[in-house]
Amino acid sequence: MLRSSGDRKSGPPRSIATPKNRLVTRWPQIVVLFGLLAYLLVSLNRLAVFPPLGEDESWIAAAPYKLATQGVLGSDLITGYYGVERHHYETDEEGD
């Protein structure tokens, strides 16, 4: 028996809402979740082994953090000092 367009029930078609299709679309999320759980199980008991942060580590991480979050290679640690918030200057350690 065919239904008219007025008799059609609202909601997604049955072929989309099947449990198998939901599992297929969620497998990347499941893999990431299991990976995070495995990482936490391996690393949580080792947190006490790592030393506390040193005084220069925040300075080193500030420019890459701003690049990742705002798309600008700069440092907010000394904002206003010759445009450092918009630029990042590195010196060559070997003196070349």
Image: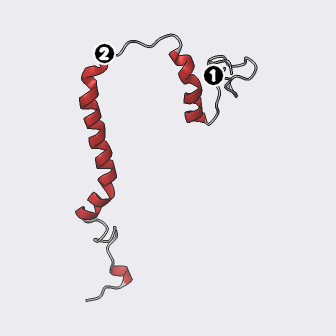
Left or right: 21 in relation to 94: left
* Residue 39 position (above or below residue 24): above
Q: Badge 2: few (under 14), some or many (20 or more) residues near its Cα, within 10 Å?
A: few
* Residue 14 position (above or below residue 45): below
Residue at point 63%, 22% (across, down)? 76
Q: Which mark is residue 76?
A: 1
Disc with the residue nearer the chain's start (2 vs 1): 2
Quadrant in the rendering for residue 21: bottom left
Q: How is the image coloured?
A: secondary structure
Helix, strand or loop at disc 1? loop
Measure the C-alpha gap from mark 2 to mark 1.
30 Å
Which residue bears the numbered disc 2?
49
Helix, strand or loop at disc 2? helix
Percent across and percent down for residue 95 are 67, 18
Percent across and percent down for residue 7 are 33, 80
Residue closer to the observer: 6 or 18 = 18
Residue closer to the observer: 42 or 9 = 42
Quadrant in the rendering for residue 13: bottom left
**Of all residues shown, which one is farthest toward the bottom?**
1
Percent across and percent down for residue 92 are 65, 21
Percent across and percent down for residue 32 are 32, 44
Q: Quadrant of the C terminus?
A: top right
Q: Amino acid at mark 2?
A: Val
Q: Badge 1: few (under 14), some or many (20 or more) residues near its Cα, within 10 Å?
A: some
Q: Which mark is residue 88?
A: none
**Nearer the viewer's eye, disc 2 or disc 1?**
2
**Of all residues shown, which one is farthest toward the right?**
82
Q: Amino acid at mark 1?
A: Asp
Quadrant in the rendering for residue 12: bottom left
